[in-house]
Image (cartoon, rainbow, N blue to C red):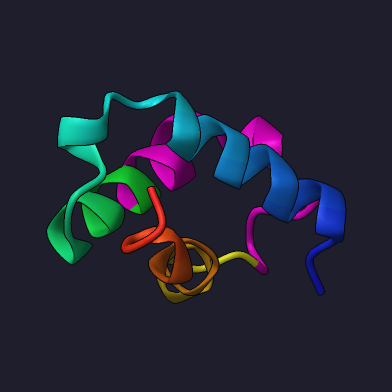
């Protein structure tokens, strides 16, 4: 199971993107894929974090940012 700290790190990364890159679900999927590939250090056990996990964390923010 992932920790709250892991989720907070991912959301912080997401919020660092320019607003134009945070507009829709396609952006979220691309971001999640990039994180899993390029930043596995954000997760204690990257094998337990999936694309769907990251998308689930960020999707609620789509309409609030």
Q: Position of residue 49 (x, y in %)?
A: 60, 64
Q: Position of residue 62 (x, y in %)?
A: 33, 60
Q: How many marks?
A: 0
Q: Position of residue 3 (x, y in %)?
A: 85, 61
Q: Is residue 2 above or below residue 52?
A: above
Question: Seen in the image, is 65 located left or right of residue 43?
Answer: left
Q: Quadrant of residue 2?
A: bottom right
Q: Nearer the viewer, residue 41 or 27?
A: 27
Quadrant where the N terminus sits is: bottom right
Q: Nearer the viewer, residue 2 or 26?
A: 26
Q: Is residue 30 above or below residue 34?
A: below
Magenta-drawn stretch contains 17: no
Q: Is residue 15 above or below residue 26?
A: above
Q: Quadrant of residue 45?
A: bottom right
| Residues shaded magenta | 33-48
Q: Looking at the image, which residue is at 45% across and 71% down?
A: 60
Q: Position of residue 10 (x, y in %)?
A: 59, 44
Magenta-drawn stretch contains 34: yes
Question: Seen in the image, is 33 located left or right of residue 35?
Answer: left
Question: Seen in the image, is 55 located left or right of residue 33?
Answer: right
Q: Looking at the image, which residue is at 46% across and 46% down?
A: 36
Q: Nearer the viewer, residue 5 or 33?
A: 5
Q: Looking at the image, which residue is at 18% across and 50% down?
A: 23
């Amino acid at each position: 199971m992932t920790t709250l700290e892991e989720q907070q790190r991912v959301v912080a990364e997401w919020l660092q993107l320019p607003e134009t890159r945070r507009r829709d679900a396609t952006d979220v999927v691309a971001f999640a894929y990039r994180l899993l590939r390029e930043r596995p250090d954000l997760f204690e056990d990257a094998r337990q974090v999936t694309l769907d996990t990251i998308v689930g964390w960020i999707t609620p923010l789509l309409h609030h940012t």
